[in-house]
Image (cartoon, grey):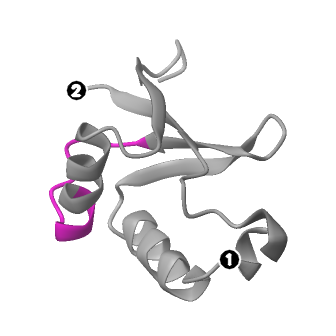
Amino acid sequence: MANFAVILARGPRWDDSRGGIREQRLWNEHAVFMDRLVADGFIVLSGPVGDGKQTLHVVDPTTRTRSAKYLLKALGRGRACLRSHPVSPGPSG
């Protein structure tokens, strides 16, 4: 199964008056959750794109950890996901 490129946007709870992501409410909890997704192998690659208001995550949908299932369920309900696309390795594998 191919990995997926998922592009996320800031959600309705984003507070522009707080500044960057590290100043947002619940930043520490968010960071712990995202670190767990990386450690579990669900997030393969991640980082800001464009003007920084969107984030690209390359994810492995075959990962079946509790955290990955939670995120996939949220994305399936349309929370913050702008679009997703299957991605395949290039000719070098």
User: Predominant secondary structure in magenta?
Assistant: loop
Q: Local crowd at mark 2 within 10 Å, few (<14), some, or many (≥20)?
A: few
Q: Is residue 91 above or below residue 31?
A: above
Q: Which residues are the magenta region?
A: 59-68
Closer to the camera, 25 or 69? 25
Closer to the camera, 89 or 49? 49
Kind of residue at disc 1? Gln
Instruction: Classify residue 49 by image quadrant.
Output: top right
Instruction: Mark 1 and mark 2 in contact? Answer it, CB < 8 Å.
Output: no
User: Residue 1 — which label?
Assistant: 2
Closer to the camera, 52 or 25? 25
The residue to which callout 1 is attached is 24
Give the percent coordinates (x, y) of residue 89. Answer: 46, 22
Q: Relative to residue 67, is residue 34 drawn left or right?
A: right
Does residue 55 appear anywhere in the picture? yes
Q: Is residue 38 above or below residue 35?
A: above
Mark nearest the camera among 1 and 2 is: 1
Give the percent coordinates (x, y) of residue 45. Answer: 56, 48
Kind of residue at disc 2? Met
At horizontal 18% and vertical 65% (from top left) the residue drawn is 65
Give the percent coordinates (x, y) of residue 54. Answer: 67, 42
Q: Relative to residue 42, is residue 51 drawn left or right?
A: right
Q: Is residue 20 above or below residue 24?
A: above
Quadrant, the N terminus: top left
The mark nearer the N terminus, 1 or 2, is: 2
